[in-house]
Amino acid sequence: MKRASVLRKMQLILGVLLFVGMLFSLYNVFIMVPTEQKMGIVQRIFYFHVPSAMMSFMAFFTVAGFSIAFLVKRNAWHDRVAVACAEIGVLFTTIALITGSIWARPIWNTWWSWDARLTTFLILWFIYIAYLMLRDYVGEDQRGARFAAVFAIIGTVDIPIVYFSIRWWRTLHPKPVLAGGEGSGLHPDMAFALYFSMAVFFILYLFLVATRLRVENSKMELEEIKRLHVLSTK
Amino acid sequence: MENLNYLFAGYSVFWLLLSVYVFVIGRQQKTIEQEIAALREEIKK
């Protein structure tokens, strides 16, 4: 199958890029960047925590895009891409939530606070867990798949709320360090490490999508062979 | 080097979750490919 070969090649190229990029990113995080003065060494969680959160947004926007495409064109492949990206988005959200909590413990003296940023981000996690459960429950039913697609599109409404929560409300979560206005900003080495880490996480995201889509493609191939087998035995 | 254990925990969680996810989808892929091969073999007979 043509799609299978494209996905395998993508997985291989992205895997090599990811390996090299990740090594350099770890070098940046643990050797190159200066230690933050107030928080100390634990602040280095930031370089994986922020990109994880950004990739979760990207994954959920992709889910919405492919859900819209599925509703318009009724192509099953679009629905499968949406489900795969939702799964990856939930993975990145889980990583961001847990690493954030670990970072918070020594700095805020608590694992969790019900402030606007943390709460809206947790709600985002619940929305896409619910989407995956719903999608699993409805199976191949087309009406159910369309309903799940609508649910996934509505779910993205929470993303701008999460993003702007630290601008709109007073929160325990730090104010934005990038494009945050007066008083915000990062040391140039820290900014470079963060941007580089984001680029590596984008490659990781694409790698996971290619890997996950190979499974979906194989599932479709298996279903087709089964269908043909049943027809030939009738 | 205060709070080094938290830094270690943070990065460990990242690598652990990522490894488990990649392992699970890798196994899924292998199982489906085996199923496809078995079915193709059966059809040939």
Image (spheres, coloured by chain):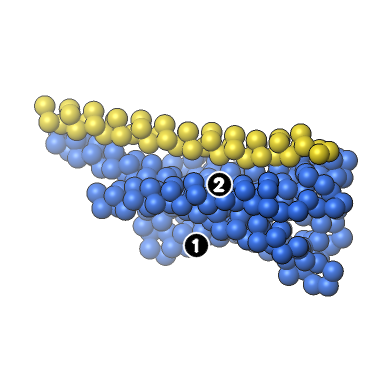
The residue nearer to you, when weighing A7 against A226, is A7
* Chain (yellow): B
The percent coordinates of residue B43 (x first, y second) are: 15, 31
The residue nearer to you, when weighing B37 against A123, is B37
User: What residue do we see at 62% from left, 40% from top?
Assistant: B14
User: What residue do we see at 88% from left, 40% from top?
Assistant: A109
Q: For residue A23, which numbered disc appears in the image?
A: 2
Is tag 1's residue or tag 2's residue first in the polypeptide sequence? Answer: 2
Secondary structure at badge 1 equals helix
Residue type, label 2: Leu
Asked which quadrant contains residue A179, the reply is: bottom right
Chain of the residue under the numbered disc 1 shown in the image: A
Cα distance, mark 1 to mark 2?
Answer: 32 Å
User: What residue do we see at 77% from left, 37% from top?
Assistant: B4
Mark 1 touching mark 2, by CB under 8 A? no
Chain A drawing hue: blue
The percent coordinates of residue A152 (x first, y second) are: 56, 55
Badge 2: residue crowd in 10 Å (few <14, some 14–19, many ≥20): few
The percent coordinates of residue B24 (x first, y second) are: 47, 33
Chain of the residue under the numbered disc 2 shown in the image: A
- Which residue in the structure is indicated by mark 1? A65
Q: With respect to residue A147, does B35 lie above or below?
A: above
The percent coordinates of residue A55 (x first, y second) are: 59, 54
Asked which quadrant contains residue A167, the reply is: bottom right
Would residue A209 appear left or right of A46 to someone viewing this image? Answer: left
Q: State the count of labels.
A: 2
The residue nearer to you, when weighing A18 against B26, is A18
Secondary structure at badge 2 equals helix
Residue type, label 1: Gly
Front position among marks 1 and 2: 2
